Image (cartoon, rainbow, N blue to C red):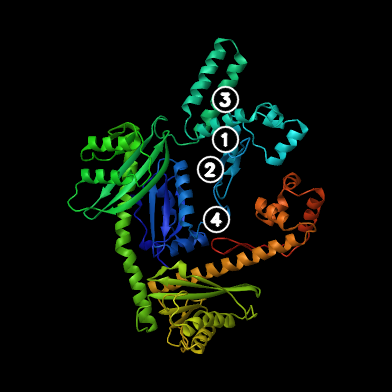
């Protein structure tokens, strides 16, 4: 357990600005990502009296060993960057976002004959345009309600749309002119698609032409004394302005630019690149590179530009490239970029105004990235080496355990017994060597027998076929068992049974986090701040996550199949269509009759049978987080 005071940044070093922060553990893995209106206020709240923290927050800050951050201009930009990092790093403590699958987006289904605007989460689909993300789904619906005044695309589901076609009667939105009602032929498919394309263009940042057109039409209507039409257009412009006010406009909407800043020392340079399109920050990325010898700042700026916009990168070149320092031979660089773009490109250093303010922000992020990189290089390898050395000394090993394997067993009241084996090499996970086991001994509550079976199956093949290296390239220097003395004794006996009593075994008991060796009557106690103990905990937690995830997957697949198997008349083809459309039994339960009837082969009789089968009382199983395998709710009545 780490002491948060050891890595707490000085309050004066934390910017009082919007941004996104990352907590990392001892090996640099991101364990939590968050955003804040004020980084200084939010981060200092994590380092208050531990008694005042939520138990999960306390666990996170004591697991973490460092924290870093990126400054942005607005909360919207912070939201976008936070969402990207959660998807990239899958942090273990971001349970809320994993449970919700993702942030909600405003989506336009351009792959349909009559495109539909709707709120979507989860995986992206081909042919659908996505805009966002938003913090809450209600924020999307509120924005969409305003946009429908100007862009009346359909928002109804497929069954509702088809029912309106059959009845030749539009829904309420069609009557109040917030839908162009293509369902009853008020508008044809090409015209409706043009409206959807205009909406997508507006959301993509091309707002100026739409607003100018509406203002011209309003002025013309007023000149023609069509005051009701002019008032309607005025309200439309106000609605669009309200939507635009929710997004960050950092520069003039006509500006397409990249802002590049480099923070450097004698050995390396940290690069930050912000992409501004339509006046908004559309993306941000950074990287650290080794600084070439005898290269001054001007030459370094030129080299970085060549690296960022080289033909092999596929990166688009904007009309304007803003840099923090003038490059060497700026005219030649601009000519090269213009050739890559196919039209003129301007390269310059902003001196004042909004562009200079934004460049200062980019430069601040580059400075912070350089500091983080230097700290990481100074501590990461050292901590890992210290953990392995401490393990060797504490356990009396002949060599440092460069390869560690950890075994854990998972079951639910004796059913669905599975086990996992995870591998750490040089104190880092080696996921391609992870293995999953379905246990055969049939004694689900007997963890000792389960551990013995996994150990025998892991090493028996290697003993019988010593030249077969397809399963594991190396044998472990240390085998870690999730358990105490009984589990360790069983593992040692299984190793002796297959002729591998030369492999060191240790058990990590959860209650006091003590280490048990096979032949010792007393456990080995490591310091709570020990890097060795922290490494074993990471291996144990990873094995637990991997085993529990496997068990949940097996149980979910079986329970879903069995429920649908009980429905008379529901064959394999219809079952496949049902799962493809709704993906889970819970979504099938909450689906409307219209949505079920829209599926191929589903009639009123089959839908009634399905409702009856799913309405039967069942024993609810605990709900689990799909990424961590942790129980997220009780699941009982």
Task: Please give the residue where the numbered disc 2 appears in the rendered image.
Answer: 134
Answer with mark 4 or mark 3, whichever residue precedes in sequence. 4
Which residue occupies 80% across, 55% down?
609
Question: Can residue 232 be seen by looking at this rendering?
Answer: yes
Alpha-carbon span between mark 4 and mark 2: 16 Å
* Separation of residues labelled 3 and 1 (CA atoms): 13 Å
Mark 1 element type? helix
The residue carrying pointer 1 sits among few (fewer than 14), some (14 to 19) or many (20 or more) residues within 10 Å by Cα, namely some
For residue 544, side relative to residue 305 (left or right): right
Say the numbered circle drawn on residue 608.
Answer: none
Q: Residue at label 1?
A: 143
Q: Quadrant of residue 266?
A: bottom left
Q: Which residue is mark 3?
A: 236
Q: Earlier in the sequence, mark 3 or mark 1?
A: 1
Which element type, helix, strand or loop, lies under badge 2?
Answer: loop
Q: Which mark is residue 98?
A: 4
């Amino acid at each position: 357990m780490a002491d948060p005071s050891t890595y707490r940044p000085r309050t004066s070093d934390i910017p009082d600005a919007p941004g996104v922060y990352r907590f990392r553990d001892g090996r640099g893995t991101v364990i939590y990502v968050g955003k804040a209106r004020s980084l200084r206020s939010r981060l200092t709240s994590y380092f208050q009296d531990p008694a005042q923290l939520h138990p999960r927050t306390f666990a996170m800050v004591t697991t973490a060993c460092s924290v870093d951050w990126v400054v942005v201009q607005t909360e919207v930009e912070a939201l976008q960057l936070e969402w990207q990092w959660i998807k990239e790093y899958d942090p273990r403590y971001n349970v809320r976002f994993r449970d919700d699958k993702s942030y909600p987006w405003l989506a336009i289904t351009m792959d349909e004959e009559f495109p539909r605007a709707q709120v979507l989460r989860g995986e992206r689909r081909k042919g659908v345009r996505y805009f966002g993300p938003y913090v809450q789904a209600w924020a999307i619906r509120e924005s969409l309600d305003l946009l429908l005044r100007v862009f009346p695309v359909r928002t109804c589901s497929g069954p509702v749309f088809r029912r309106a076609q059959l009845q030749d009667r539009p829904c309420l939105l069609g009557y109040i002119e917030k839908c162009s009602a293509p369902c009853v032929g008020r508008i044809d498919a090409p015209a409706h698609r043009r409206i959807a394309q205009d909406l997508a263009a507006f959301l993509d940042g091309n707002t100026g032409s739409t607003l100018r057109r509406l203002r011209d039409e309003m002025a013309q209507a007023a000149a023609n004394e069509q005051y009701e039409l002019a008032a309607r257009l005025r309200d439309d412009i106000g609605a669009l302005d309200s939507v635009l006010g929710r997004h960050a406009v950092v520069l003039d909407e006509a500006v397409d630019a990249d802002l590049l800043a480099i923070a450097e020392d004698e050995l390396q340079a940290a690069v930050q690149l912000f992409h501004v399109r339509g006046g908004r920050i559309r993306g941000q990325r950074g990287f650290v590179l080794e600084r070439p010898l005898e290269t001054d700042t001007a030459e370094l700026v030129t080299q970085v530009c060549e690296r960022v916009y080289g033909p092999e990168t596929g990166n688009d070149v904007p009309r304007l490239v803003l840099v923090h320092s003038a490059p060497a031979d700026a005219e030649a660089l601009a000519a090269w970029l213009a050739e890559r773009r196919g039209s003129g490109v301007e390269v310059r250093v902003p001196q004042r105004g909004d562009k200079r303010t934004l460049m200062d922000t980019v430069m601040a992020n580059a400075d912070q990235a350089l500091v983080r990189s230097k700290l990481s290089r100074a501590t990461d390898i050292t901590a890992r080496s210290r953990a392995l050395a401490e393990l060797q000394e504490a356990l009396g090993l002949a060599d440092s355990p460069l390869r560690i394997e950890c075994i854990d067993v998972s079951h639910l009241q004796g059913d669905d017994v599975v086990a996992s084996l995870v591998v750490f090499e040089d104190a880092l996970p080696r996921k391609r060597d992870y293995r999953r086991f379905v246990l055969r001994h049939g004694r689900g509550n007997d963890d000792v027998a389960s551990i013995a079976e996994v150990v025998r199956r892991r090493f028996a093949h290697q003993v019988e076929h010593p030249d077969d290296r397809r399963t594991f390239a190396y044998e472990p220097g240390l085998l870690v068992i999730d358990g105490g003395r009984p589990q360790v004794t069983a593992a040692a006996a299984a190793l002796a049974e297959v002729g591998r009593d030369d492999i060191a075994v240790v058990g990590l008991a959860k209650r006091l986090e003590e280490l048990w060796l096979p032949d010792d009557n007393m456990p080995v106690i490591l310091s709570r701040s020990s890097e060795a103990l922290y490494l074993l905990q990471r291996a144990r937690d990873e094995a637990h996550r991997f085993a529990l995830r496997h068990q949940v997957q097996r149980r979910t697949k079986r329970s879903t199949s069995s429920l649908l198997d009980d429905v008379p008349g529901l064959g394999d083809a219809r079952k496949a269509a049902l799962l493809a459309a709704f993906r889970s039994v819970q979504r099938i339960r909450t689906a409307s009759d219209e949505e079920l009837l829209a599926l191929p082969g589903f009639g009123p009789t089959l839908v009634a049978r399905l409702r009856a089968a799913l309405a039967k009382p069942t024993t609810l199983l605990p709900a689990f987080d799909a990424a961590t395998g942790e129980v997220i709710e009780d699941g009982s009545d």
